[in-house]
Image (tube, grey):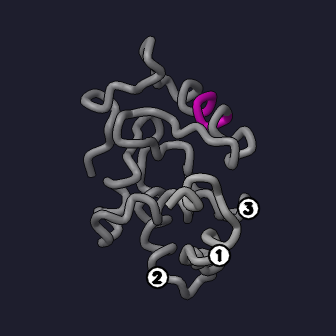
Amino acid sequence: MQGWATGDPRKLRLLPKRKPLQAAHQGDEAVEAICDVIRRIPRGWVATYGQVATMAGMPRRARLVGRVLQRLDPAIKIPWHRVVNAKGEVSYSLSRNGGDTLQRRLLEKEGLKFDANDRLDLDRCRWLD
């Protein structure tokens, strides 16, 4: 059991490998459904990852929404910055390469205000289609 905690390479090989998200292409219905929902979010409003997933017909797939947004081609014009976590926060991560800071700036530019805990008031600014 100690091998699991210490990262023994022999034990780590037994862990299941995650399947990479398939590349987004025009025929990918899930990606298109997610992007269609995000395109409808009006300026000055936000939606949560879970809300987008549900509206795209994939309830309980909030992480899929995050993965799709993280891998989007920058040339695709959708307001990705209007999607926040369930607490009303920008999700910070090193893997976003500064996208989290940009997201906050874009939201503030649209007039959204963060509180002292770096959260948006979802009761006031959550988009309800």
Q: Where is residue 114 in the image (x, y as percent from the top left)?
A: 46, 20
Alpha carbons under labels 2 and 1: distance apart: 33 Å
Alpha carbons under labels 3 and 2: distance apart: 19 Å
Q: Is residue 60 above or below residue 82?
A: below
Disc 1 to disc 3: CB gap under 8 Å: no
Q: Which residue is drawn at 37% across and 65% down?
A: 61
Q: Mostly what secondary structure, the magenta segment?
A: helix
Instruction: Give yes or no for residue 112 being in the magenta stretch.
Output: no
- Find the magenta span and give its range: 102-106
**Residue linked to disc 2:** 29
What is the residue that sits farthest to the front in this orientation?
2
Give, as a three-letter code, the residue at label 3. Ala
**Residue linked to disc 3:** 75
Badge nearest the viewer, 1 or 3: 1
With 45 as the anchor, is 10 left or right in this view?
right
Numbered badge on residue 13: 1
* Residue sitting nearer the eye, 117 or 57: 117
